[in-house]
Amino acid sequence: MSKPFKQELIAPCGMNCGICVAYLRDKRKCLGCMSRDKKCSIRNCEKFQKNKFRYCYECDTFPCTRIKRLDKRYRTRYEMSMIENLEYIKENGVSKFIEREITRWKCLKCGGVLCVHNGKCYTCGT
């Protein structure tokens, strides 16, 4: 598995794609939102494409309806906030955010990565 905690895997919406089930699985593996051109609602956002910013917090309409919906879904289902992630990145930088993610999503049994969507460690299966 490629390194799950790197800047290229932090999506414009604040999602760490390295903890996503689609990235962690073996079959039909996703390479992260920044590596693909389609199916990312944020990257398909007209303002994102037009203004060429890296993270949604750089947009003058942040947090927009799209981010608010995504944030609500992730807070409700997975106890993670895209808006909080983006605010942390804005205040502390992406390197500090990645350091925080390593601690937050580390399997206590084997040191592997926990999946945000199901809590499973894809290294040891815990």
Image: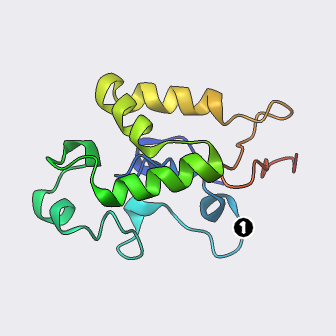
* Quadrant in the rendering for residue 64: bottom left
Identify the residue position indicated by label 1 in the image. 26
What residue do we see at 60% from left, 56% from top?
A: 20
Q: Position of residue 70 (x, y in %)?
A: 45, 57
* Quadrant in the rendering for residue 89: top left
What residue do we see at 33% from left, 28% from top?
A: 93
Query: Residue 19 versus residue 111: which sits nearer the camera?
Result: 19
Residue type, mark 1 in image: Asp
Q: Position of residue 81 (x, y in %)?
A: 49, 42
Above or below, 116 relative to 93: below
Above or below, 84 relative to 15: above
Answer with left or right where residue 78 lies relative to residue 55.
right
* Quadrant in the rendering for residue 112: top right
What residue do we see at 18% from left, 65% from top?
A: 49
Answer with left or right where residue 7 lies relative to residue 60.
right
Query: Residue 97 versus residue 75: which sits nearer the camera?
Result: 75
Answer with left or right where residue 9 lies relative to residue 114.
left
In this orientation, does residue 53 appear? yes
Q: Quadrant of the N terminus?
A: bottom right
Q: Quadrant of the C terminus?
A: top right
Which coloring applies here?
rainbow
Query: Residue 115 versus residue 8: which sits nearer the camera?
Result: 115
